[in-house]
Image (cartoon, grey):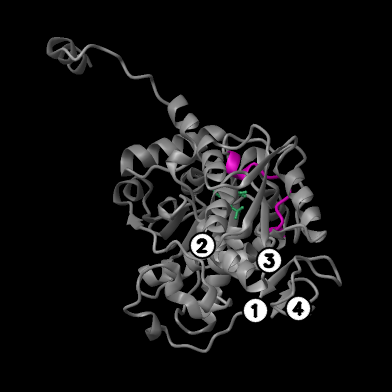
Amino acid sequence: MMICISCGAEYDNQEIIYTCRECGSILEVVCQPQVSRDIFECRKSTMWKYKEFMPVDHSLIVSLEEGGTPFCRCQKLGDDLGVELYVKVEGSNPTGSFKDRGMSVGITKARELGVDTVGCASTGNTSASLAAYAARAGLRCIVLLPSGKVALGKLAQAMFHGAEVISVRGNFDEALEAVTALALEGQLYLLNSVNPFRLEGQKSIGFEIVDDLGWKSPDRIILPVGNAGNISAIWKGITEFHEAGFISDLPRMTGIQAEGAAPIARAVEQGWEDIVPVENPETVATAIRIGAPVSAKKALRAIYESDGMAETVTDEEILDAQKLLARREGIGVEPASAASIAGLRKLVESGQIDKGEQIVCIVTGHLLKDPNTAINACKEPIEVDADISALSRIINQS
Ligand code: AN7
C-alpha cells in the first residue's frame, strides 16, 4: 500500500500514481515486514540482503549487485575535526552513484507493472543509472537533461547505455515538470524520486550504516540534499529498522545544500513545513542544482523528527572539501558529494556539532562523474622527453 504523507489517503501498490488524487501531496510506500534481523546473516552484501524490506515482486528483480558499498573510517580527517568519522562511499555502486539502489527497485517495479517505456529528468546521475538498469531490463528509456549543465561522465553513461537523451533548454526543475507531464499522459513510467518505489531502494543506505556499526545508529548522518529524496529515504530505512526493534537509537539527519540552491536549508532556518522554491538555482555542484525539490516535505519531516539540521556551503567550501577528502583520505568524489564533508567542517567550526560525535558522511557519487571540475582544480602536468636527467631535474625541483 502507498499512503499520502499529508492527508493519509491510501493507494494500491499496483496503481501507477505519483501524487495524491485528494490533496496533491507526495506518496510513500508502507513497509512493515515481521522478520527478525538474524535472517540477514550470511547473505551476500548487496542491498538485496534486506529484500524483505523491498516491497516488489522478488521473482522480477533487476539488479547489478548495487549496495554493500564501502564504509570507510576516516581517522585522519576525523581527528582533524575532533569527531569519529565514517564515510559511506556510494560512488562504488555499479554506475557510480547511490541512484542505483533506487533504480534497482524502481525498474523491478516497472517490470512488475508491465510498462515498456521509462523516463526521468536528471541533473545527471539519475539518468546514468536509469539508462543502465533500463538496458538490463530491456526497456525503452527517455531522459531529459538540463542543457549544458550535466557533468561529462554522467552524459557519457546515459548515452552509451542507449537512453534517448533529450537536452532541454531550461534547468532541472523545468525538465522535471515536463517529464512529469509526459508521465501523467501515460507516455512513460516516471522514475524520478517522486516515484516512492525509488526511495524503497535508497533506504538501504540507512540499513547498511546501522548494520556496519553492529546494529547501532551513529549520532549523526550528514548528506548532500538536492531533490531531497535520499535524506527522506535514509530516514525511512532507519525508522523502519527502529520500529522492527533492530536498533534502539536514532541518528540526527543533517542535510547540506549549496548556497545557491538551498530551499530546504532556508525552510529549516525558518521552521517551515514546506519550501519556497529557489528560482534560478546555481552551484558548481551541478548534481544538486535544484530549486524546487519534490521530496521537500519528506526531507523536512526527517530533519525535524530526528532533531537534525540543515546547513549551506559555498562552492569554494565544496571544492576545498572535495580536494581534502581526495588528498587526505584517498576518496575521490564528485563536487555534490563533498558538500557533506564541507557541511561537517562548517558545523564543527561553528560548534553546532559536538566533539567526539560519531558521524557518517554519505558521499553520493564518484570523482570520475565530473572529470572537468577535477582537472580544472589541478595544474597541468609538465611534459618532457623520457630522459633520466630531465626527469631527475623535475622531481628534485621542489
Ligand atoms: C551525486 O541525478 O537529482 O537529494 O537527477 O547526483 O536525493 O536529490 C541527483 C542528485 C546528491 C542529491 N549527490 O540527492 C539527479 C539528481 C549526488 C547526486 C544528490 C544527487 P537527492
Classify residue 158 by image quadrant. top right
- Give amino acid for label 4: Tyr
Name, please, the residue furthest toward the left. 388
Q: Residues within 10 Å of mark 2 (few under 14, many from 20)?
A: many
Gap between marks 2 and 1, in whole Å? 18 Å
| Residue 347 percent across, percent down from the top left | 51, 48
Q: Is residue 256 visible?
A: no
Task: Look at the numbered disc 1 and give the secondary structure of its residue.
Answer: loop
Per the image, the residue denoted by label 1 is 30
Per the image, the residue denoted by label 2 is 101
Per the image, the residue denoted by label 3 is 115
Image position of 172 (left or right of 371): right
Classify residue 31 by image quadrant. bottom right
Gap between marks 1 and 4, in whole Å? 10 Å
Residue lying at 46% horizontally and 33% vertically, measured from the top left: 371
| Residue 184 percent across, percent down from the top left | 81, 60
Badge 1 vs badge 4, beta-carbon distance below 8 Å = no
Task: Look at the numbered disc 3 and give the secondary structure of its residue.
Answer: loop
- Give amino acid for label 3: Val
| Residue 290 percent across, percent down from the top left | 68, 45
Please state the extent of the stretch shown in magenta in the rendering. 286-296
Gap between marks 4 and 3, in whole Å? 19 Å
Residue lying at 49% horizontally and 31% vertically, measured from the top left: 373
Q: Nearer the viewer, mark 1 or mark 4?
A: 4
Q: Nearer the viewer, mark 2 or mark 1?
A: 2
- Give amino acid for label 1: Val
The label shown at residue 11 is 4
Reply above or below: 384 against 76: above
